Image: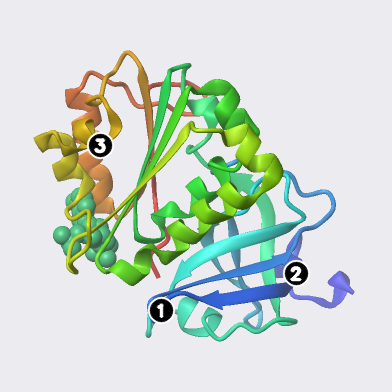
């Protein structure tokens, strides 16, 4: 059947949607079937989207499900005039999304050298790759402590992360693997909540050290960062000021960054 499709669809998989959940008017998650032969490393992204005439409409999305799960999950923003998300937000169970099954990315264990604490800094939907990482047993083999932070404008936007943590805590197998190693800190910047402010400010003014027991330390800490361009630049500067070198798949380092999906 693939022979009848336009050339631009070569190698593209059509995957039925199995679940859709809307968190806020700006964010939603969806899951689809995972092709049998598809493997990925926690934290990687893949090109997904919708069929669109001669050429599929594809964007980079972090895989939010763990690499051992039967389905693939994604967490997305909704942009009213975004070419893809304006359509994607209307997905229903049974619809088909398209995927180019070639996972890539730098938010992976292979791009970091060994350390004691793994710090995962995110804003908004930048939490998606870490939803995979914090459910990967390898993460807890490699690190003594794992700290996930997410900064959002509003309280409701933190629901996705909170539900994820609750799911881990209530899962018999996973909660055993994770033990007491995982800490989650959700902060808001535009709506009143118990923990307010940007994590970049927390790192600079000592609130991060108070909340986690220690300030950012190049000796013990390894960092993954995912969010907007401005957020990445600020976190990157904080890591570099602490004496950390950026890592990549070919040359592992002490911190890695990746831009969250934007439209
Ligand atoms: P703020 O409300 O102070 O701008 P956005 O929706 O604009 O991507 O922002 C998502 C979250 O990321 C917001 O809470 C926002 O805070 C925060 N944020 C924006 N820019 C930065 C930055 N340069 N460093 C850290 N956090 C940021």
Q: How many other residues sit within 10 Å of disc 2, few (<14), some (14-19) or many (≥20)?
A: some
Cα distance between the residues tagged 2 and 1 = 22 Å
The span from disc 1 to disc 3 (Cα, nearest Å) is 37 Å
Mark 3 Cα-neighbour bin, 10 Å: few <14, some 14–19, many ≥20: few
Q: Earlier in the sequence, mark 2 or mark 1?
A: 2
* Disc 2 target residue: 15
Residue matched to label 3: 211
Residue 82 bears which disc, if any? 1
* Residue displayed at 17% across by 67% down: 190
Element carrying mark 1: loop
Tag 2–tag 3 contact (CB < 8 Å): no
Q: Residue 246 at what x, y percent from top left? A: 35, 27
Q: How many marks?
A: 3
Report the side of 151 relative to 16 (left or right). left
Of the image marks 1 and 3, the number of the one nearer the N terminus? 1
Q: Is residue 44 above or below residue 182?
A: below
Residue in the picture at 18% in, 66% down: 192
Above or below residue 29? Residue 136 is: above
Q: Position of residue 209 (x, y in %)?
A: 21, 30
The mark closer to the camera, 2 or 1, is 2
Contact, CB < 8 Å: mark 1 with mark 3?
no
* Mark sitting earlier along the chain (2/3): 2
The secondary element bearing badge 3 is classed as helix
């Amino acid at each position: 059947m693939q022979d009848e499709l336009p050339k631009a669809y070569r190698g593209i998989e059509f995957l039925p949607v199995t679940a859709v959940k809307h968190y806020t008017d700006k964010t939603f998650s969806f899951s689809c079937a995972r092709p049998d032969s598809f493997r990925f490393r926690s934290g990687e992204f893949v090109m997904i989207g919708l069929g669109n005439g001669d050429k599929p409409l594809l964007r980079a999305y972090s895989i939010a499900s763990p690499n051992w799960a039967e389905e693939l999950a994604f967490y997305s923003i909704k942009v009213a005039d975004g070419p893809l998300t304006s359509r994607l937000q209307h997905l229903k169970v049974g619809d088909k999304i398209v995927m180019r099954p070639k996972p890539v990315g730098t938010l992976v264990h292979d791009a970091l050298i060994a350390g004691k604490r793994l710090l995962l800094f995110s804003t908004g939907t930048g939490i998606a790759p870490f939803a995979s990482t914090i459910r990967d047993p390898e993460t807890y083999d490699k690190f003594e402590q794992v700290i996930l932070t997410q900064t959002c404008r509003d309280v409701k936007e933190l629901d996705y992360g909170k539900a994820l943590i609750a799911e881990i805590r209530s899962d018999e197998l996973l909660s055993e693997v994770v033990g007491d190693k995982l800490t989650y800190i959700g902060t808001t910047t535009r709506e009143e909540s118990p923990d307010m402010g940007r994590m970049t400010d927390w790192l600079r003014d000592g609130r991060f050290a108070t909340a986690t027991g220690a300030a950012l330390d190049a000796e013990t800490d390894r960092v993954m960062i995912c969010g907007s361009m401005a957020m990445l630049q600020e976190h990157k500067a904080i890591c570099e000021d602490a004496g950390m070198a950026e890592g990549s798949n070919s040359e592992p380092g002490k911190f890695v960054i990746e831009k969250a999906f934007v439209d």
